[in-house]
Structure formats: structure tokens, C-alpha cells
Amino acid sequence: MLSKTLIVNGIARDIVADGETTLADILRKNLSLTGTKVGCDTGHCGACSVIVDTKLIRSCSYKFKRLKQHATITTIEGVGTPDNLHPLQLAWILHGGAQCGFCTPGFIVSAKALLDLNPNPTREDVRDWFQKHRNACRCTGYKQLTDSVMDAAAVMRGDKDIKALSWELPEDQRIWGTRYPKPSAVARVTGMTDFGADKILKMPEDTLHMALVQAEVSHANIVSIDTTEAEKMEGVFKVVTHKDVPGKNRITGLITFPTNKGDGWDRPILCDEKVFQYGDALAIVCADTEAHAKAAAAKVTVVLEQLPEYMNAPAAMDDNAMEIHPGTPNIYFEQTVKKGESTETIFEKAPVVVEDDFYTQRQPHMPIEPDVGFAYFDDEERLVVHSKSVGLYLHHAMVAPGIGIEADKLVLVQNPAGGTFGYKFNPTMEALLGVAALATKRPVALCYDYVQQQIYTGKRSPWFSHLKLAADESGKLLAMESDWTVDHGPYSEFGDLLTLRGAQFIGSGYNIPSINGIGRCVATNHAWGAAFRGFGAPEGEFGSEVLMDELAEKLGMDPLELRYANVYRKGSTTPTGQEPEVYSLPEMIDILRPIYKEAQAKAAANSTNEVKRGVGVSIGVLCAGLDGPDHGSADIELNEDGTVTLYSTWEDHGQGADSGMTCTAHEALRPLQLAPEDIRLVMNDMSRCPDSGPAGGSRSQVIVGRAVMDACEKLLAAMTTKDGSFRSYAQMVEEGLPLRYSGSWTIPAEACGENSQGKPFIFYMYGLFMAEVAVTLETGVTEVEKMTLVADIGTVGNKLIVDGQMYGGIAQGIGMALFEDFEDIKKHSTMLGAGFPYIKQIPDDMELIYVETPRKEGPFGASGMGELPLTTPHAAVINAITQACGVRITELPARPEKVLAALKNK
Ligand code: FES
Ligand code: FES
């Protein structure tokens, strides 16, 4: 043990600790300074950045023994406080720099270290600094962070007034349509938001810490699991196996499609008979400390009989492949699409036909915060499970029977989440926490490390597509044939729905009179398929958007003009045969055209023999809402002090659910003239909030938004007196009027019928992407120099939040185009290995243009928005590579070696 005095945020603190302890642990555990977050824990993300003396360091990989006596340490708590915010924190709020906020303390501390050294940096200096210090953000797309540093630096130099960093309410006091910063922004920029791991540090002393015993093969029969040695290890309270699970020990995928050949009960909580994928949980050690739990987990002996591993869909579809789930064929769901006349005769006669194969990869979500949760029994003897769930009521139904608990005895709560991007649309550790708490009758906690985050949470399912387009000589589309295969890993949850998206969205944006296609969902032994932002659009539309460029090339047409000739106009129908709710795509192309021409001229002028530049475009379309009559609820309550409290389970990935609730309610309650702070939020706790539905499918703003409006309207109606004035709280009580009102809304849509025809959605989002890239011929390295997005998401409710979603989604699309993958389980199990895009991989130059076409049914005209930016930006990048250097990459990601090989084969 070592004893040292450290000067932490200006105060001398005496610390006694093992010399091997990391500085992050000293700060978080010894000093309770939980503003310093730990993400990757391996030096890849910068979430743990602090300043030691004058040097910026990553505290997760800096040992206590390295610190000198009286070393000075600055953490986020020493940068500024809620009532005395540092200019950097103010700027981060103003620019929407904190989405989930998990990376934020590390970035702000890092920026402070930069400005201490260089008070007048250029934007490139800022980007170089964040790149060098590996500050990683998965939410924002980085541009706002550079904006924040530049503005804060200007204020600190005295070049700008500090007032420039404050957001002011407009004169009409309206926040809808403005850049109102989200209510939780101050907590996030000061490091005061308690994420799951922070809360675990504050749990009761008798909390047991969990460690998983996980499979290190991808497919096997289980012969035996021996826990004897592990039970004897220091600090162990219990080793839990499938034998301790009172329920069905399965997570149900809630299959709703009668044509699904499985029953949905395919995912074990703790494996009993078989291992289906690498990382599957075999046992849980519950011990007094995490270190003891991990040490004991290594002593559990598992005997396995290895089976053939089917690591992709073609392997699992082979005639000789065994059934991964005995009794269920590996191809367990098929979905056809048929629209218009038979495509066969059209293709026979069509003047121009193009076809190609496409592959989109197993994209990892890579939130900075790894998965985390805890569980306990409350005073009403209910099992309460806290996690990053973005589908509380949904997950409740998926895990309760498997755990073996009565539905009314299980409560799910969402912790503030350090990013999910959809992986938490699927349960991850909720059932593991539940069975461990049930088996031990003690509070339990589980923190995944980053390798576990990678190997044992769901991923975007790879798609193999073959697409064919027919057109006349003018480029008018006549027909499409499509065939797509979804590699969904071993677990079926939402795989059928994802496969349906191929029928609904391949070729969407264009009026294609005849479509014939079939898709299939396949069980494999690679990582299970989870929702990921875009859910089917980035996978399915990638092929159709690249094929449109191939068609343009064959016709000798400009790719943008080919799109212009075919996009939805009055009389057009979607692939499901539905009339779109708005027709904004021609206008969007008209807006982009001059910008596109200018970009093309610039690319031509700036291309050299070594570096070729090109411009690519793509159209992206996606629904907002789940199929058919999607439904959600929200409540409102009038408080004694005249404020209101809103209740909902509008779960927050970091996208700004608090802002969505506040802005919508503030607009709906305009007659009451409330200040935004008068709207209090109680969110994401099933014991206190109604079922708003999951936060996925870009549904929350439209459905929960309408439910909030409904609740507000009911409250306003109850408060309104005959003369049009409003009753006070006291008058409401005196007259015996209820104070709490429930609102709800159901989308007037119908799920698709046979052959995927119908009107499954009434809200869509439309995007037109333009990528400007530079390809270095010698290395095959592609740099995206600029991205432009023209978007129609209806009326924009909060420009700050929407901009943030657009930048962040585009950045993930660039990652999908060029870098990211989770194919090689070993190599891709870290952020660096999986191709996480850092700031220099994402262009600083991103332009957003909104075409605000109000949606009739939307809350104040809004549609959804969160997934639009990740519909097809990757297709624009790939099309731009072709325009730059003549090679077309149809299998993602387009890493340099792939581009180089294609250049050599040209
Ligand atoms: S670099 Fe320390 S937590 Fe990621
Ligand atoms: S705001 Fe940066 S990771 Fe979420």
C-alpha cells in the first residue's frame, strides 16, 4: 500500500491505496469523484481524461504508484460547477455537445488542457488534439465539440462576451422550434449525471458483484458445468447456473408473425443444453467484490462438445448445415414483396437492366459506456432491475417468464444511458440481473468490460442482397427484383421485423411500379442481431442506392438527375403500394442541385494524379413508428406550486428524450404561460410512469409527442373555467377535479398484409445525402471531406437536438462505409480494433438543410428524426468513391485494402 497526498481540484487529499490502483479508481472510489467516467478502460476512449500537473492523461491506465507526492489533479469537478460553469461547459450546452454526456467530462477536461497550453487554437489544432488524446464520442459527430472549444476559447481570450455562450428565451417565450438546450445538459457537462456504474458505487454495502462465465466457442453442446472450486473462492456468495432459474430460462423474442418457423423462445438466460454464440452466459458468480467474482468465474469448469460453427448466413443455409436450434430450420422466416405487374416480362423487354450483389456488415454500436445494470428487491418485495433498456415495458414482457417472476413483481428502470443507438432495444443483462437477485435475495450489480460489450450485446445484422433494376431509355424505373438474406445470429428477436424492412424499404424514395422480391432471416452462430439506428434502411437501401448509380452510369445520366426523374411525386407509391404522406424529394433535389454542381467542379479541380476526388449522392427514406397501429401513453399532473409533472417511458439513448418531452409539453401548454423549468419530468421508471412504448423506430417524438399533447389538452380542458381563465391548483382541489391526466395516441395505420402491401406507416422521414471524398490511390485511403444532408423530417421541434442527431447519425454512416465491423471476434472486440471513428475520420465540414413540410398528424407538424441520418450516408460515400476513382465497393466496409485491391483490379 502507498500513502500519498494529492492536490485534487485545489484541495489536498490524503490517499492510502495499492500502488497498482488506477487513478480512475482512486478518483471514483476513494474520492467519490464520479464525474470522471470509465468507458473502454483500456486507453481507447478518453472518457477518463484528467489533468495531472499540466499533462492530460487517461486515468484508467495511469497507476497510483506513478503519481508524485503533491501531484495536482484536475477533474471535471474542478473545471466548473452548476452555479459557476466554465466557458467550455457553457459552450458545450449551447452547441449541444453533450448528447448522452458520457464522453463529455473527458472532452471538457481535455479541451481545458489544450486551452491552458494554447489559448488561440485553430479548428485543426482542436481536432488534432482530440485525435492525439483519443477523445472519442459516438453521439455527436464531433463538429459541435470543435465549435464549443472555439467559442469558449474566444470568450476566455476576451474576444467574445460570455453572454455569447448563453441561450436566451425568445421574446414570445416559445421554445418549440428553437435551439433550447436540453434540461439535463448542466448535469451532463459537470459530470453530475450518475450513469449505471456511478450508481453502483453508491449501492448498499451488501451488494453482490457479478461476473459471468462465458463461452469461448461459438457452437457447442454443454456436457457439464462444475462450480465446486469456484464456490470455495474468497468472497463468493453463490454461483448461479441454469439450475437456479425458476422460470423458463429463455428470453422471448415476442414473435408475432405466424409464418415464423420458430417459437421465439430461443435465447437462454443461462445456457443449459447448448452454446449458440461466443460469449453466451453459462454461469454467474456473485461475490463481495468484482475482483473476487472474476477470480472465481475463472475457476468454473465447463465441459463442452464442440459443434460446427456457422459464422455467416451462407454457411448456415448450406444443405448440410445442422439446425442451430433443433426443430427450427436455420432459415426461419421469409418475407415476400409483390407490387404491380409481374416483373418477369418487364425485365425481358426492358431497354436497360442493371443488377449487382451487396453486403452490409455486422456493425457494432460502440457506445462509450459499456453495458451496465443492477437489481434489488424494493420495500414492496418487487424485483427492480435498473439497466440501459430503451424498451422498459417491452423488455418486461420479454424477460419476466424466463426469470420466473410474476409480472406485477418485476419493475424495470432505465439509468441514464451513455449511448445505445439501438443495441438496448434488445434486452442484454436484465434477465441475468433478475435471476442473480432472485437466487441470492441480495442487491446485485454487473458491469461489462468493453470486450463483453462487443462480444455479448447484439449487433447490426449483416445483409447479403442481390438487386436488379429495369428502366426505360429515359431512366424511368420500370421494375425491381430483390433478394435479401439477413444473418441474424442465433437469437430471433425482431429478426422477422428486420427482414420485413427489406420489403418495405429497398428501392424506397422512388416510384417503382412493379416489384418482386423475397427476403429471409437466418440463424447463425455469430453475434445476435439487435436493432441499430436505421433498422433495415442502411442494410436494404445501400444496395438500391448504389445500384441507382450503376443505372445512371449505364444510361450515361447524372446520378442526381436519374434520382430526380424517379422520386416520389403525386401518383407515386412506396414499395408497399402506399401513397407517401408528403412529396418533398423533388424540392430537396432542386435545393441540392447547385451545391452538388459546385462540389463536382471543386472535386474535378482539386483531383491530382495521386489523390482523386469525387461527389456521391443517395436518397434515404425511413418510417417513423413501428408497423401498424403503434401506440403510446404519457401522463401529466398539476402540482401545488402551479408547475406540472410529466410522466413517460420515453427512454433516452442520449438523443434528448427530456428535451422532446419538455418542448412538446411547453408548446401544448402555451395558454398556461409556463417557463420551461416549470415542467418537471419523471421518466423511465415502470413503477411511476405509463407505457410510452420503446424508444426505437424514430417513434417517440410522434407517438409519445402526441400522447403528451393529449394529456396536456385534457389538463387544460379541466383547468379551463367558463370565462376562459384557468383554475389554480387550489381551485381544482376545491372543486374535486382530478390533478393527473393520462394521454395516449395510436397511429392510424395498418400493418402490411400479404406480399408486404399496405399502409404500415403514416410518418416517413426523407433525406438526400451528398458526400465529397478524396481517395489516395497509393494507399486506398478514403477521406470524407464534406457531408451535406437535405432533410425533411416535418417541422423541426428543437433545432439543437435535431442538428445533433443528424451530425451523429452521419458520422455513424461514415463509420459504416469505411471502418466499422464486428466479424473477427478477437480483433474486433475493442474500439480501436472494430474501427471506431475518431474526430479526424469525420469531416468538420457538414452542412444540414431542412425542408420543413409539416406532417398533418405529427405533433405540431413534426415527423420522427433520429434514424434518418443513418439511412444511406454510407451509400453516398461509396458512390463518391466510384466518382473519384472508378472503383465500386459493394461489400462494406470500404477499408483501404479493399479499395486498393479494387484499384489494382480495375
Ligand atoms: S481511455 Fe480510459 S476509459 Fe477509455
Ligand atoms: S455525447 Fe459523446 S458519447 Fe455520447
Image (cartoon, rainbow, N blue to C red):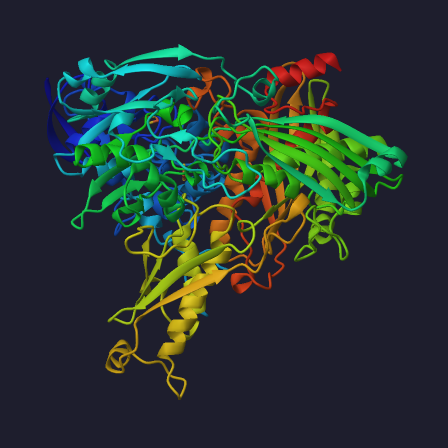
Depth check, front residue: 374 or 337: 337
Quarter where residue 597 is shown = top right
Image side of residue 667 versus residue 320, left or right? left
Depth check, front residue: 490 or 140: 490
- Find residue 755 and report its horizontal and vertical position in percent: 68, 44
- Find residue 106 and report its horizontal and vertical position in percent: 34, 34
Quarter where residue 539 is shown = top right
Q: Which residue: 43% across, 51% down? A: 693
Image side of residue 616 versus residue 439, left or right? right
15 is higher (above) or lower (below) than 731: above
250 is higher (above) or lower (below) than 677: above
Q: Which residue: 33% across, 41% down? A: 400
Image side of residue 62 versus residue 660, left or right? left
- Find residue 620 and report its horizontal and vertical position in percent: 64, 43
Q: Which residue: 36% across, 12% down? A: 304
46 is higher (above) or lower (below) than 234: below
